[in-house]
Amino acid sequence: MSKNISKDKFITMISEMEQSAMKDNQKCNIKCNKIKTNFAKDKKKLSQKKKCHGKCEKKRMKSVKSFHAKYPKEYKRFVASLGGGSSKKKKTRKGKARKSKKKINK
């Protein structure tokens, strides 16, 4: 169960959590970057390096998602406050476009 947390406090908490997750991700990626590859010749090392980076990203996403799951109400409120895309769709005209008619003076 989550406790009620103020909006400002949650914003600071989420930014701190994301910063720490990124630091851990960068440390993990340093190990992956030590795998030397020749992209043209060594496909095995290249795939090994990609898997390593993928594991690091999965770890980061797992920690972020667990934080979001810990505070679902606050996270929902935080996302709603960000704004962005609207749920309303723009209406388009279904009829034919109007053509302008010119009057001919005689």
Image (cartoon, rainbow, N blue to C red):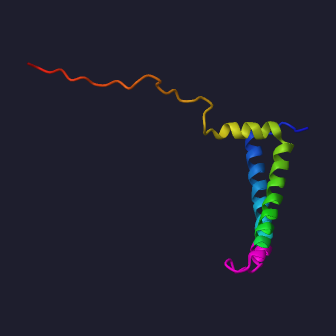
**Does the image show residue 73?**
yes
Question: How many numbered circles are shown?
Answer: 0
Q: Residue furthest left?
A: 106
What stretch of residues is rendered in magenta? 31-46
Q: Position of residue 31 (x, y in %)?
A: 80, 74
Q: Is residue 95 left or right of residue 13?
A: left
Q: Residue at x 31, y 25 (%)?
A: 99
Q: Residue at x 69, y 36 (%)?
A: 80
Vertically, is 83 above or below 60?
above
Asked where in the image residue 63 lies, by quadrant, the reply is: bottom right
Vertically, is 35 above or below 59?
below
Q: Inspect the magenta stretch and tell me whether residue 19 lies in it.
A: no
**Is 23 in front, or is 35?**
35
Q: Residue at x 73, y 46 (%)?
A: 11
Q: Is residue 75 left or right of residue 40?
A: right
Q: Residue at x 78, y 49 (%)?
A: 13
Q: Position of residue 32 (x, y in %)?
A: 78, 73
**Does the image show residue 6?**
no
Q: Position of residue 85 (x, y in %)?
A: 60, 37
Vertically, is 13 above or below 100?
below
User: Is the N terminus in the top left, top right, bottom left or bottom right quadrant?
Assistant: top right
